[in-house]
Image (cartoon, helix red, strand yellow):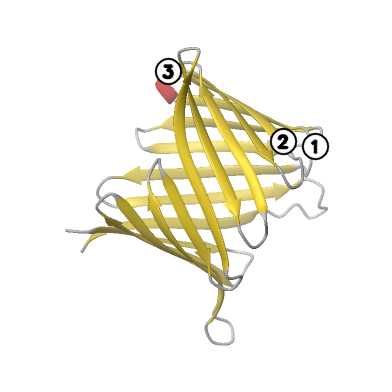
Amino acid sequence: MWNASIKGQCAADSSGAAATITVNAGEVKLKAALSEANFEVGPSFSNLSLSLEKPASFIIDYHVPKQDLRFQFMNSIRVLDKQLNLTYTHSRREKNLWLDGTLIIDSSNKVSANYKFDSGNCKLKYCYSQEGGVRTFEPCYDVSKNCWDFIVSQRIYGGDVVKASYQTSTKILGFQWSRTSPFSGSFKVSASLNLTEEARIPKLSAESTWNVDM
């Protein structure tokens, strides 16, 4: 029996929508992702991608409108008795190349780095979790922009997680509430507020995932 998940997303300030269908076929996953779908003047789709994924091993992604192939390979090695997770990503047509690495110091501390070879952009992130992941602090430093981003998340009532974020470069404050259930799937409600705008009206979006057996 195959297992599939369907994810839908919409934003209050946009007429577009997004949807993702993922099918688990043994060791690999087949995924179709559609975004920027517009239904104002009849259905129109401007962003479609198809993917083949083997978790923790590789992802091959084909962007249909751009006719672009993206390859992503994942691996783990041991460095000084610590686990280092590496992800190599290459976009063929756009010629983007970047490398992600996460060093797991212990169950509460992780250090990550992301480097883009085409632009030279580099981001460094430290993740500290308390009480087995109930509370998490994630400061991130963007080397090229010389600025910080901060994320704080808190797990409440078992499967509920609330998260707050702040980007110092754009002065955008974000809030997110998510819930995951093995029976009813998951959903996420997000709000973002641009502190540089005079009106300061929050932008809202919602995302939901349903699991079905095929």
Discs 1/3, front: 1
- Residues at marks 1 and 3 touching, judged by CB atoms closer than 8 Å: no
Which amino acid type is marked by label 1?
Ser
The x and y percentages for residue 26 are: 24, 52
Residue at (59% x, 43% y) in the render: 175
**In this rendering, position of residue 98 left or right of residue 44:** right
For residue 175, above or below residue 106: below
Question: Disc 3 and disc 2: Cα gap in Å?
Answer: 30 Å
Name the N-terminal-most of marks 1 and 2.
2
Secondary element at tag 2: strand
Which amino acid type is marked by label 3?
Glu
The residue that label 2 is drawn on is 122
The residue that label 3 is drawn on is 131
Q: Residue furthest bottom?
A: 42
Q: Residues within 10 Å of mark 3 (few under 14, many from 20)?
A: few
For residue 88, above or below residue 102: below
The residue that label 1 is drawn on is 144
- Residues at marks 1 and 2 touching, judged by CB atoms closer than 8 Å: yes
Q: In which quadrant will I find the C terminus?
A: bottom left
Residue at (63% x, 28% y) in the render: 125
Name the N-terminal-most of marks 3 and 2.
2
Discs 3/2, front: 2
Residue at (34% x, 55% y) in the render: 29
Where is residue 203, by image quadrant?
bottom right
Question: Disc 1 and disc 2: Cα gap in Å?
Answer: 6 Å
The x and y percentages for residue 14 are: 62, 68
Question: Disc 1 and disc 3: Cα gap in Å?
Answer: 34 Å
Secondary element at tag 3: helix
The x and y percentages for residue 183 are: 24, 49
For residue 209, above or below residue 118: below
